[in-house]
Image (cartoon, rainbow, N blue to C red):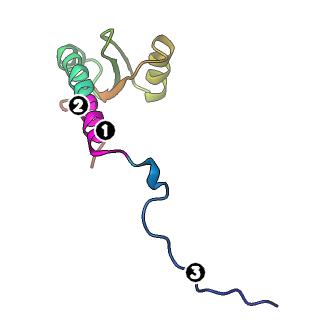
Amino acid sequence: MTQLSSNRTARLGRVFPERQLSPEEKARRKAEDEAFYQRCRLIFDRVQPELIEEYYDWFIIIEPDSGDYFIDLDEKVARANAREKHPDKKRLIMRLNETGTCGRI
């Protein structure tokens, strides 16, 4: 039987170093994400007081360009409804509770 050599060296660094984003691109994407979140948060803050009593802890998916939101107890159903009406739009999912968070840390 042949013995395999175990003198391999571990590769260090990124798997695809040529695909790294520049600091400017990272900052631009972070700013876009924050602006998107703020637009969604405005809609959430507007509808949350009237919906929280009846739909506490349900999922809400917000599409900020149209102002549409979709609520359901089941996350998958809410996602499907939102995807059906706005298939190519970016959406944000939250929970109808005091903070809007979906889970615990």
Q: Which residues are magenta?
A: 21-33
| Residue corresponding to mark 3 | 8
Distance between the Cα atoms at labels 2 and 1?
14 Å
Mark 3 or mark 2, whichever is nearer to me: 3
Left or right: residue 60 versus residue 83 is left
The local crowd at label 3, few if under 14, some if 14 to 19, many if 20 or more residues have their Cα within 10 Å, is: few
Residue that appears at 25% across and 27% down: 37
- Which kind of residue does numbered mark 3 sit on? Arg
As helix, strand or loop, the secondary structure at mark 1 comes to: helix
Q: Quadrant of residue 28?
A: top left
Q: Quadrant of residue 67?
A: top left
| Residue corresponding to mark 1 | 25
Mark 2 or 1, nearer chain start = 1
Distance between the Cα atoms at labels 3 and 1?
36 Å
Mark 3 or 1, nearer chain start = 3
- Which kind of residue does numbered mark 1 sit on? Glu
Q: Is residue 54 above or below residue 1?
A: above
| Residue corresponding to mark 2 | 34
- Which kind of residue does numbered mark 2 sit on? Glu
As helix, strand or loop, the secondary structure at mark 3 comes to: loop
Distance between the Cα atoms at labels 3 and 2?
44 Å
Q: Is residue 11 above or below residue 65?
A: below
Residue that appears at 19% across and 32% down: 99
Confirm whether residue 45 shows in the render: yes
